[in-house]
Image (tube, coloured by chain):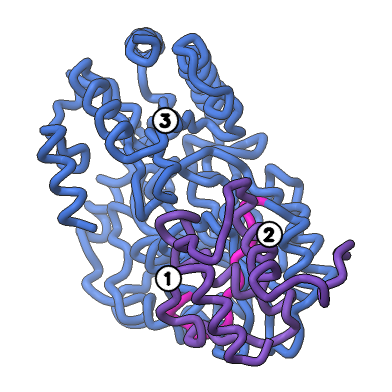
Amino acid sequence: MSNVNENELTCLERVIKAIRECKRTKADITSGSRLAEDLDIDSFDILMLIGELEEEFNISIDENQLEGVVTVGDIVDKLEALSC
Amino acid sequence: MLDKAKAMVEQIDFNPYRVPFDNEAYVDLASNNYLGLAGHPVVKQAAVAATMQYGVSLCGTPVASGYSDFAGGVAGRLAAFTGVESALLFPSCYQANNGVFSALCTKEDLIVVDQYAHSSLVGGIQAVGCKINPFLHNDCGHLEKILKRANGYRRIFVVTESVFSTEGSIAPFNQIIALCQTYGAVPVVDDSHGIGVIGKTGRGVLEHFGIEHYQGIYTASLGKALANMGGMVGGDAETIEYLGYLCPHLIYSTALTPPVLGGIMGALDVIEAEFGELGGRMWRYKQILAEAILAGQLSVESVNSAAPITPVFCGDAQTTIILCKRLYEKGILSTPFIEPSVPKHACVLRLIAGAGLQEEKVRWAAEQIRDILSS
């Protein structure tokens, strides 16, 4: 169970938290981090990330809804469009 | 991706995927011939005898002229050998892994799969069009987290390999089965690098973990330790019967040929009679290679692989191919794994010293590898 009050985290911070669950990386992750080039997240990893995002945001995400995302910021934009 | 790989191969002036080699001149640490059975006289004679009796091909699918009592017997023997209730033979394990999911899964299912699962499993899973959730490699904690939150699906499948072929880890399959039982999921395991390799008598992952009355799906290649070709799918009798009539990857493909069927029977005869000696030799050779890697001052990750696979973690593709070339120039064959087979920065040069090699050649190869790694 998270020790952090999710209401205090921004959408970006929550996305980064989900990414760290998948990649277990210590690298700096910012809005501009590119999923493939900077974080080694390939199309299969995206599926794992979707699972973590679904748990973090308590929503259901279809793979198509993240089509075209290149950066972490793109994911945030897509999620905010889903009113997260 | 192909253009990039071709450019790299040209720059290094070595294509590891098209190397010509003379069997006698090279020490083969690339082949999956774990027990050396591909050249075993018993296996060869069994293949020839089956050919003389049944011909070179039955020229039909298993639901047409391709079925024979002989094929049924081979499937039954493989089922008994591996510890499943019933089994089917496929032209390859790639087809088996693709076909199983196409036939058994629907869009209403959830498939939870190890992130490093073989591409044949991933391809088969993706073709279903259902929800897919990879879990962190061999991480039962992460797997359980996913299973706990999964709801509303018709069925849930948990998919893994027994032995991961690039880095030699063994999946915690007993724990995975326990989680499947707790959360009502169906376990699916690809034992291609486990059958004939792990387990006290070489019977694979179910023997290795002492699993009886296995209730999931089992697949395995018959072209590695069993030294022939084809694949098997094992499971409960009802599921296997269903697949036998309704799996397109099986019923629309020519059945395994008599020489292959005979060869599989011969391989099983040898394993059942000689695994103690052959397996012992295979593990001893693994230890020889592992010590050479350590002496070459590489990471202990390579030497700690649980299976008789010795991975040399090289990082990037170019370093991997260059090392493969250096070994080839010394007369040693090895297998480089680069993207997309492995993650981009996790390229591996894999070494497998099969029991059919002479120990002096393995020791010689190990010395060459140690010298190259430490130079």
Q: Quadrant of residue B266?
A: top left
Is residue B132 rendered magenta in the image?
yes
Q: Position of residue B184 (x, y in %)?
A: 79, 76
Alpha carbon separation for disc pair 2 and 3: 33 Å
Q: Could you classify mark 3 by the number of other residues whose Cα lies within 10 Å: few (under 14), some (14-19), or many (20 or more)?
A: many
Left/right of residue B153 with respect to residue B97 in the rendered view: right
Chain A: colour as depicted: purple
For label 2, the SS is helix
User: In the rendered view, would you say B126 is above or below B86?
Assistant: below
Instruction: Magenta stretch: give its range.
Output: B126-138
Alpha carbon separation for disc pair 3 and 1: 39 Å
Left/right of residue B237 with respect to residue B273 in the rendered view: right
Q: Position of residue A70 (x, y in %)?
A: 42, 70
Q: Could you classify mark 2 by the number of other residues whose Cα lies within 10 Å: few (under 14), some (14-19), or many (20 or more)?
A: some
Q: Could you classify mark 1 by the number of other residues whose Cα lies within 10 Å: few (under 14), some (14-19), or many (20 or more)?
A: some
Quick check: can you spot residue B73?
no
Q: Which residue is mark 1?
A: A70
Judging by colour alone, the chain drawn in blue in this rendered image is: B
On the rendered image, what quadrant is the N terminus of chain A found in?
A: bottom right
Q: Which residue is mark 2?
A: A21
Q: Nearer the viewer, mark 2 or mark 1?
A: 1
For label 1, the SS is loop
